[in-house]
Structures are given as C-alpha cells and as structure tokens.
Amino acid sequence: MSEDSGTRSQINAFLSELSTWAKRINLVGSTDPAALAKHVSDSLSAAEYLSPGSRVVDLGSGAGFPGIPLAIARADVEMTLVEIREKRVHFLRHCVRTLGLGARVLRAKIEEPPAEPPAERYDVATLRAVAIPSKAVEIARPWVKDEGEIWVWVGSSADRHSLDPHAEISLGKRGSVLRISAASVSRGTH
C-alpha cells in the first residue's frame, strides 16, 4: 500500500514515541530503524485488504504492531487494541491520544474476550507474534463474528499445523499473513 505524506508523518511520530518509551520499558526487541521499518512494513501490508468500516481487533497489541500502523493508514476502520500488560496499555493509550487516532485501547486478557452478543464481535482479528498459528487462531475465534476473519502474521518457516487459510498476504521473504475464515474454526470452550 502506498503511503501519503500524512500517513508517513504519523508513522514517524509513532516510531519516535516507541523509541522514547522503549528506553524505559521493554516494548520491542530492537529499536534499530531497519528493524522498526520491517515491523511497520509487515503491519501496513494488510491495510489495503481491510474492508471500509470494518471492526478490527488487534489481539496482544504489545508495542502496537500491527494495530497502530493499520489505524494510521486506515482511519475508516474501527480499531481496538487489546493488551493485558499495564505499561504497554499506557504506551498504547498515549500513542492513540498523541497521534489523534480513532482507536480504543482495551486492557484485557486475549484468552478471555468480553461477554458480548454476537453482533458486537469483530469483523477481523489480527495477531502478530502472539502464539503459534494454531493457538493464535483458537484464541482469536471468540472475538470474531462467524462471517469474519482471523489474520495471523507468520514467518516464512512458521509451523502452520493444520491451518487452511482462504487467502494469504505475502510479506516477501519474511513470511505472510494467513487470512482464515472464522466460520472454519471451532469456537472451542470460550
């Protein structure tokens, strides 16, 4: 997806905040500009595939990847960032406020979705570096509508187990985003 100057400016502001906060709390493995550029690129690779007006939940948001870059690039989607660790929740809320994003931050365990009626579930759940792909899909299923999708970022050598994505978004040599139909995943015990 091509970036306009406003998107690039907001991404740069986000990365500046991330680098500043990372000096005080553990947010990412490396704040090296090349490493951060890969995180941003991998996140933005999915932006054009989101339907306008989608309700998206980024589970295990951590340092904000992919949720914050997606919220920056796609102001037309309703983004919810879910994180349990308090310091990271503070960071995410700070970024949402500072960048003027329309996203919300929810402090919750991703394994324990809020008790919402099915109409309040999300269209898309995103998970990046949360768990092995099969576990990530299991965790995400209760958050997503039956007609929704679960998007899992996987490395090039990821163990996909028995996952059967109906579509994939290529990340080049770094892997892909598996797009899995929620209806094809058991709701389990959640």
Image (cartoon, helix red, strand yellow):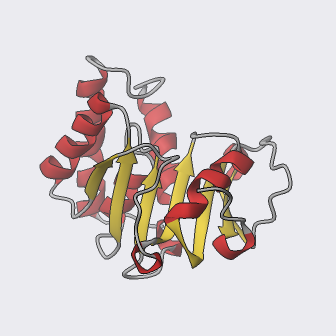
Write down the quadrant of residue 56 in the picture: bottom left
Q: Position of residue 185 (x, y in %)?
A: 72, 66
Identify the residue at horizontal 86%, vertical 55% (top origin).
162
Instruction: Pick out the residue farthest to the right.
Output: 162
Q: Nearer the viewer, residue 95 or 113?
A: 113
Q: Evaluate whether residue 57 shows in this view.
A: yes
Write down the quadrant of residue 88 in the picture: top left
Q: Position of residue 45 (x, y in %)?
A: 53, 60
Write down the quadrant of residue 174 in the picture: top right
Q: Is residue 89 left or right of residue 44?
A: left
Q: Position of residue 21 (x, y in %)?
A: 25, 26
Q: Evaluate whether residue 46 shows in this view.
A: no
- The quadrant the C terminus occupies is bottom right
Q: Nearer the viewer, residue 174 or 80?
A: 80
Count of residue discs:
0
Identify the residue at horizontal 60%, vertical 51% (top origin).
139
Q: Is residue 29 above or below residue 52?
A: above
Identify the residue at horizontal 36%, vertical 81% (top origin).
53
Q: Nearer the viewer, residue 1 or 104?
A: 104
Q: Position of residue 92 (x, y in %)?
A: 27, 42
Q: Is residue 137 left or right of residue 37?
A: right
Instruction: Pick out the residue farthest to the top.
Output: 24
Q: Is residue 144 above or below residue 53?
A: above
Q: Is residue 130 above or below residue 101?
A: above
Q: Is residue 169 left or right of residue 7?
A: right
Identify the residue at horizontal 44%, vertical 43% (top origin).
109
